[in-house]
Amino acid sequence: MFDTTPYEQKMNGAFMHFEEELKKVRTGRAHPGMLDSVQVEVYGTRVPLNQAANITAPEAQMLLVTPFDPSNISAITAAIRDNQGLGFNPSDDGRIVRIPVPALTEERRKLLVKQTSEKVEEVRIAMRTIRQDALKEAKRMKEAKELSEDDVKRIEKEIDRLMAETQSKVDAAFRAKEQDILTI
């Protein structure tokens, strides 16, 4: 018998990955997740910033980074400044790092929407690949006489239903993020 559960799990995994990617896209407001991509060198090892410091957003246009060990403050400041994709200019007072989040220009907002739509296309490609894998497996099982023609049609309908369900979740998440980006 054919089990669609692993393919459903793969689709959910692709959607969860998409949601994580959306969190990295910057909107006009400060969010601690904006610094998820920053790697900082502490004690001779590169670690994610959130493992070397506490990150908070006390106000809409400001991020505060409080290092667990104040001796790492210059490495943290340098790591944030060196990450060109963020475009932040942090400043520190010896205890905490303040990162002002500049307002987005209209041009930058449109570019972010375009980048987000590229992420939508990536998740759609991943979903189609998962669908193709499921249909190939069903066809292989039919040729091996493990499934009947009716079973294959039923499996195709189930896979297509899962695809449509996940696609609608992706579209809803994209629309919400687009609205968030374009809101001033």
Image (spheres, grey):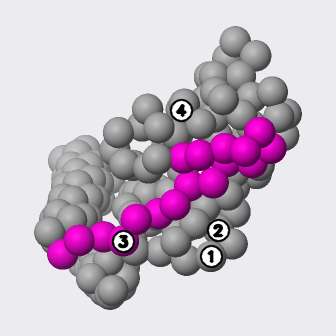
Q: Residue at x 69, y 63 (%)?
A: 56
Instruction: Say which residue label 4 marks.
Output: 79
Q: Which mark is residue 106?
A: none
Drawn side of residue 18 relative to residue 112, left or right: right
- CA–CA distance between discs 3 and 4? 22 Å
Amino acid tagged 4 = Ala
Q: Residue at x 14, y 69 (%)?
A: 107
Residue 28 picture quarter: bottom left
Q: Residue at x 66, y 44 (%)?
A: 92
Magenta-span inclusion, residue 137:
no
- Whether residue 154 is visible, yes or no, is no
Residue 116 picture quarter: bottom left
Q: Which residues are magenta?
A: 90-106
- CA–CA distance between discs 1 and 3? 13 Å
Quarter of the image with the N terminus in it = bottom left
Amino acid tagged 1 = Glu
- Tell me residue 7's x, y (percent): 40, 58
- Whether residue 122 is visible, yes or no, is yes
Amino acid tagged 3 = Ala
Q: Residue at x 35, y 39 (%)?
A: 84
Q: Which mark is residue 103?
A: 3
Describe the element under mark 4 as helix, strand or loop: helix
Instruction: Say which residue label 2 marks.
Output: 57
Is tag 3's residue or tag 2's residue first in the polypeptide sequence?
Answer: 2
Asked if marks 2 and 1 touch (Cβ < 8 Å), the reply is: yes
Describe the element under mark 3 as helix, strand or loop: loop
Asked if marks 3 and 2 touch (Cβ < 8 Å), the reply is: no
Is tag 1's residue or tag 4's residue first in the polypeptide sequence?
Answer: 1
